[in-house]
Image (cartoon, rainbow, N blue to C red):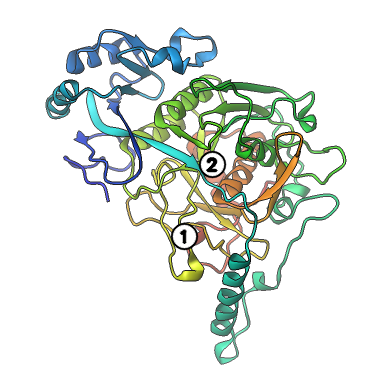
Amino acid sequence: MDQWAAGGAGAGEVGGGGVARAEGGETTGRFIVVLSNEVQGDAGAMTQALQSVAGVSSVASPLDYASRALDVREAESADATVFPTLGVAVLPADRNRLASINTAVAQDPRVVAVEPERILYVRSDQGGPSLEYARGYRDGVAHLYEQLTAGGAEPALESHISFVDNADFTWGLQATKASSSKFDGQGIRVAVLDTGFDLEHPDFEGRAVTANSFVAGETAQDGHGHGTHCVGTSCGSADPPDTRRYGVAGAAEIFAGKVLGDKGSGSDSGILAGIEWAIANRCQVISMSLGADVRQVSRAYEAVGRRALDAGSLIVAAAGNNAQRSAGNPGFVGIPANSPSIMAVAAVDNRFRIADFSARSNPVRGGQIDIAAPGVAVFSSWPMPRRYNTINGTSMATPHVSGIAAMFCQATGKTGAALWSEVVRAALRLSLPSADVGAGLAQAPQ
């Protein structure tokens, strides 16, 4: 577990300077600097703070680009990159500069924390349900049934429920009641920060799609598939040609930010650039099916999550796939989903059982599962020519919740923390530990 050189921030604030040691996850050698609320939002003041504590001269900012879509390749040549809305900056590796920043953390109130920049990954298993996975479920369910029926007790209601894809809807849309909702996300902007999107996918012809790449040397076109799948689940068409409906908020405006490359990974810099872009473009929901298996909360992502909520943007993130419950390993929620201000999503199957891979709540402050959604055998869009694919993961559960959040935003007009409350309040309680499924199964407004 990561340790902090100084005390952590209290609930609802970003304070108490500290420099993180990277004891978990893959790092890039760069550093993320979290700046105080006093300078957050003021690019000039943030730049002055960095010049004072780190001696930087050239600074890149999303403010220099149309729609605040940072050119990450150009930014790489600068001494630092500032993200004004988020109140964070990224500095390249420099031992001399890091020494001065370490000193500033203790002495300059403008610098809240410094931590290593990490590499994050997609949160899915594209191989589909395996035989081992099925056996694990069989054994686990048999054991659960024995426990529930001991002494004549009846099994839980959801043990009798089973959803399947039919000619009209995927099982996930049925289970979350998105299939029967009168809301469709009309007028709501949903940003899916992932591996990009297949801009030529025929199911999205005529849809409002804004796409941008925050991966150096790659366009927004999805060369992996994960991003197109997540966009499809959150915002796929209400009436796709020649197949069942698989999208939750079929009329939402799509912002597809490529923050993970075609190999399925990306750095914090690109992800932060994507979040800044999404907030600047007034996206009420930001869906991130990505993460790293790091137990400790990232001070940077917690600052970003809280500031996003303040700006009216709800960040929804995948809890992680590091469990193997059939082998006795419940896993843990990793970054960024373990941040108190980012909604963490677990995965269940079509009988409302926790997915074998779905991470359990992390005991760190804010590391709990907040809600669950369909994440096993999820059918959605895929880059052409394949067009569709069925895969597993908390990555697949996350866009279900993101689409439902868009529906609630349309239905209530609420954003940020108020929207979070609406989504969680409406969840269907399950007879599973809250450590596994939080408030329960996400349900669409009716």
Residue 23 vs residue 236, the one in the foreground:
23
Relative placement, left or right, of 373 versus 100 is right
Q: Is residue 77 above or below residue 106?
A: above
- The residue shown at (36%, 37%) is 302
Q: Which amino acid does label 2 sit on?
A: Ser
Q: How many neighbours does mark 1 have within 10 angstroms: few (below 14), some (14-19), or many (20 or more)?
A: some
Is residue 407 visible to us here? no
Residue 304: image quadrant is top left
**Residue occupied by mark 1:** 323
Residue 111 vs residue 101, the one in the foreground:
101
Q: How many neighbours does mark 2 have within 10 angstroms: few (below 14), some (14-19), or many (20 or more)?
A: many
Residue 421 vs residue 245, the one in the foreground:
245
Is residue 82 visible to us here? yes
Residues tagged 1 and 2 counted as in contact (Cβ below 8 A): no
Question: Which element type, helix, strand or loop, lies under badge 1?
Answer: loop
Relative placement, left or right, of 121 versus 50 is right
Residue 350 vs residue 43, the one in the foreground:
350
**Residue occupied by mark 2:** 289
Q: What residue type is labelled 1?
A: Ala
Q: Is residue 272 above or below residue 427?
A: above
Q: Position of residue 280 (x, y in %)?
A: 51, 19
